[in-house]
Image (spheres, rainbow, N blue to C red):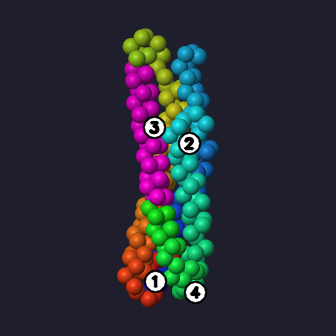
Amino acid sequence: MAMPLITNLVLRIVALILLSGAAVIIVTNSAKASVDDAIKFNGSVKTINAYKYGLGTSVFGLIYALVQLPFAIYHVITREPLVLGNELFLTFRFYGDKVVSYLLATGAAAIYGFAVDSKRLIDDLDNLVKKGGRDDLSHLRSKYDRFSIMASLGASLLLLGFICTAVSSVLSSLNLAKKRSGTAEVQLSY
């Protein structure tokens, strides 16, 4: 029975690391560029709503992972849940895992959506400027491309954090089902 316990602990630690990385990337990634004071790009967590949402989901997931981690560590070390047989706690963890995993998925999707849509916008703008006989937007594009790559990296870390939390969610649903079916000992996850 130790394997699901260790698996859940590892998943929670990996999720914590991934979400920390995502939060750092989202907060530190920014770019500013302009062409003739008419075309400007200012990208950061302060100016892009999808980025704010992604950061919010990452921080929420981090807090949740930090709350759950001591319970998982205790359960692996002692082979006994810290809150022995407490169905309320199991229910909280069951729904908490579900809510957090879906928030992380939507945070990653928001950032990916922003990156894809804004790249299309930059491409269309570049084509429009070229048709007007002006220089291309290579200066703006190079800064934006770097920003977009880092945004996609942050979203990827959020997505991987979602996967870890979703698998943990499956383990907690099995644990709750086992408790509700009347099995005396709950050993699947923490």
| Mark 2: amino acid | Lys
Q: Which image quadrant: the N terminus?
A: bottom left
Label 2 – label 3 distance at C-alpha: 11 Å
Q: Nearer the viewer, mark 4 or mark 1?
A: 1
Given the image, on which type of amino acid does mark 4 rest? Thr
Q: Is residue 86 above or below residue 151?
A: below
Question: Which residue is disc 1 drawn over?
Answer: 186
Q: CA distance from mark 3 to mark 1?
A: 43 Å
- Residue under label 3, please give it: 114
Q: Quick one: label 4, few (<14), some, or many (20+) residues within 10 Å?
A: few
Magenta segment's dominant SS is helix
Q: Which residue is mark 2?
A: 52
* Distance CA(mark 4)–CA(mark 2): 40 Å
Asked which secondary structure carries label 2, the reply is helix
Q: Nearer the viewer, residue 143 or 72?
A: 72
Q: Is residue 159 visible?
A: no
Crowd class of label 3 (few under 14; some 14 to 19; many from 20; radius 10 Å): some
Residue 42 in the image, given as x and y percentages of width and height: 58, 30
* Residue 185 spot, x, y in % from top left: 46, 87
